[in-house]
Structures are given as C-alpha cells and as structure tokens.
Image (cartoon, rainbow, N blue to C red):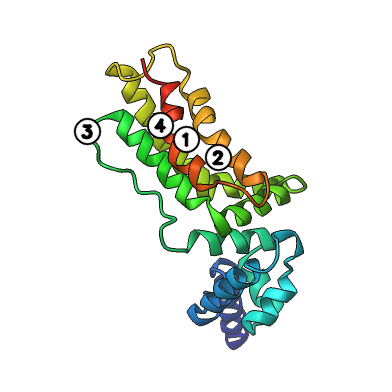
Amino acid sequence: MAADKKIDVAVEHIEDEQKTRPGRPRSNKAHKAIMEATRRLLTHMPLSDLSIEAIAKKAKVGKTTIYRWWPNKASVAMEAFLEQPGIQNIVPTTSTATEAVMRQVESLIRQLRGQNGRIIAGIIAESQSDSAVLELLYERFLKERVEALYEKIEQGKANGEFKPELDSFIAIDMLMGPLFLRVLSGEHGIDNEFAEKFPKQALFALAV
C-alpha cells in the first residue's frame, strides 16, 4: 500500500508539472527558417494568397510547428515584418517637439514603403474578417508609435510649438492616416515625392 501511495504521489507530481510547464520552446533554427520563408514568399505574393502550408513547405518544417507558435498566417507575417532591420521604433533625441514629430513621421514613412507597405496592407485586409489581427497590428506595431507621437504633441502644445487647442489624438490621425491611405492605395504607395514633402506639410497643420 505504501508503494502504491508513492506511485500515486509521483503521478500527481508529473501531471502538475505538465499543467504548469510552458509551451514547447521555439527552435531558433526553425524560427529563422519560417521567418525567412515568409519574407521570401511575400515578395512574390500578397498576404491573401499566402498559406501556412506554403510557409511550412518553403521553411521545410511541419505545419504543426508553425501552428504551435502562431495562430494564423497574419501573425507569422507580422513577426516576419517586425524582425527586419530598421523596423524598431527608436524615439529620436531632439531639441524641439516639432523636430521629434517630424523624425517619427519620417521613420514611419521609411518603414511603410515598398514591400513593407504591401505586408501591412495585407495585414489590414486580413483584419477586416478577424478583429484579433487588427489588435495584433495595433499592439505590435502601432501602439508605441502612437504613444511616442502623443507625448511629443503634448510637449509641443505645452511649450508653444503647436496650437494649444489641438486634440492630440486627432492630430495623430492627421499625421498617420495619409500614410496608411497611401499604403492601401495599391502599387504607387508612398512615392519619393510624397515621402519628401509630407512630414513638413503635415506639421503646418499643427504649428501655431
């Protein structure tokens, strides 16, 4: 009986461990292969045509490996996008709020041009049928950029650089909205002329 009790205790301990043990850790090699495969596939097709099966085949991994780490193809694409060099949101150190906002807008323009813009456009399209995808886009990409712009606009209002009556969130919509409109507009997207002129033009609406 004592031996049976010890076995029961041991089994319970194992079951408790299994319940609390975190998910299987990612293989760095497999993760890198999946990210690279996703980026390569998205250079040749829109996100709407991409499939988990295609990513798995290109990365030479099983579909179950991908589904273990991501719930859908938009999540894979979002991570592949965010892991690229130059995508991190680095808040510039500047002497004025005006310059800080301009640098933030210029940075966002660089991040949304070309292939990156097409990926984001695809993620936005996917979000129309899945609100979780839109939440992912906001939490992983937009949130820290919105927060940084809000802080600098409030600073500019306080020190007299921007109109004190500005609604800061509407001002952010004015700064970011045209960029995403361009991204969603198709192949022309954010062209060189727009990229050069927009930051200064947008700031005219904020300045006193």
Q: Name the residue under label 1.
A: 198
Identify which residue, 98 or 138, lies in the foreground. Answer: 98
Which residue bears the numbered disc 2? 179
Q: What element carries label 1?
A: helix
Which residue lies under the disc numbered 4? 200
Q: Do tag 2 and tag 3 residues touch (Cβ < 8 Å)?
A: no
Q: How far apart are marks 2 and 4 (CA)?
A: 14 Å
How far apart, in angstroms, are the residues tagged by discs 3 and 4?
17 Å
Name the amino acid, label 1. Answer: Phe
Amino acid residing under circle 3: Ser
* Three-letter code for the amino acid on which mark 2 is drawn: Leu
Instruction: Pick out the residue farthest to the left.
Output: 95
Cα distance, mark 1 to mark 2? 9 Å
| Callout 2 secondary element | helix
Does 19 sit above or below residue 65?
Answer: above
Q: Quadrant of residue 79?
A: bottom right
Q: List x then y, in percent, for residue 6.
A: 56, 83
Residue 163's disc number: none
Q: Residue at x 67, y 47 (%)?
A: 124
